[in-house]
Amino acid sequence: MVVTDLDGSVLDFNTYSWQAALPAIRLLKRRHIPLVFCTSKTRAEVVQLQQHMGLTDPFISETGGAIWFHPAHTPTKPTGAGKLAGLYAIVLGLPYRTLRGALIEYRTTAKLEIIGFGDLPAEQVGKLCAVPAQVAPLVKQRDFDEPFIFAQPPTTKTIDDMRRHFSRRGMRIIQGGRFYHLVGDTDKGTAIHRLRQWYEKQTGARVTIIGLGDSPNDISLFAAADIPILVKRHDGRYDPRVRAAIKTRLAGAVGPAGWNRAVLHVLKKFD
């Protein structure tokens, strides 16, 4: 099973294109190897992207907030799943309104200029995320994650104080490639472990996970993978925060080109 971040990995950081990743995506389809998107993107964004790519595998949205399954391709409803927006969902995170309210309360008390997605119109959110204009409204349809930025670069102490504050409320601050994220007491790794259990129950065999990403938001993804692979960032470097935190293989190139190269290389070993 290939579990991957999207922005800066399968998708080009600036253009949102996945063309450079197509050879590996097509090979995964031919081999019937699940391609699981594990991202900070919303359910609505991922469903649209899957439709464009012709994919129907389960996916993980909003930094581990929920695991989603397409009913037409999931014969039995997964244990613990409900039905949301026409999909089966195992919910692991907190509702968006709870996170949004907590962020507003904190910034008011701490007197910090914190700007969440809930403060911005879809057009501005789309520009910040570098997504096409027609995708921007989907970015706003948040269920379990409030991304945010600071008007001025925060100090390490500011971030540490925020993490302590929200930890006491059963929430986490996670840093991604573009934004900080306020989420419930979950992460990508927690969701991946749950999904692995589901696949192993369905197949009766141990699942090997190839995990790919490019930012600190993917550290728990790497920890949950058997073969973790770090993709070069759009600036041509590997994220030093990830390299300091966990040992991974290196993709060898930037974004979807690096992602494609790494996946094809690993799959050759399974021939």
Image (cartoon, rainbow, N blue to C red):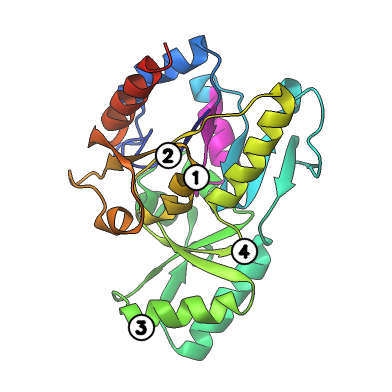
Q: Is residue 143 left or right of residue 243?
A: right
Residue drawn where x is 44% and y is 83% of the image: 161
Callout 4 amino acid: Gly
Q: Mark 1 — residue?
A: 39
Q: Does 220 lie within the magenta span?
A: no
C-alpha span from label 1 to label 2:
6 Å
Q: CA distance from mark 3 to mark 2?
A: 30 Å
Residue depicted at x 47% and y 38%: 134
Q: Amino acid at mark 3?
A: Lys
Image location of residue 191, percent across then percent down: 61, 47
Residue 177 is situated, as x and y percent measured from the top left of the image, at: 35, 53
220 to 78, vertically: above or below: below
Check whether the beta carbons of the residues at disc 2 and disc 4 lie within 8 A of each other. no
Are the two marked residues, 1 and 3, in contact with CB atoms closer than 8 angstroms?
no
Mark 3 or mark 4, which has the lower sequence index? 3
- Amino acid type assigned to the residue bearing label 1 in the image: Thr
Q: CA distance from mark 1 to mark 3?
A: 27 Å
- Label 1 or label 4, whichever comes before in sequence order: 1
Q: Which residue is mark 3?
A: 157
Report if the CB atoms under discs 1 and 2 are less than 8 Å apart. Answer: yes
Q: Which residues are magenta?
A: 35-51
Crowd around label 1: few <14 · some 14–19 · many ≥20 (10 Å): many
As drawn, the label of residue 184 is 4
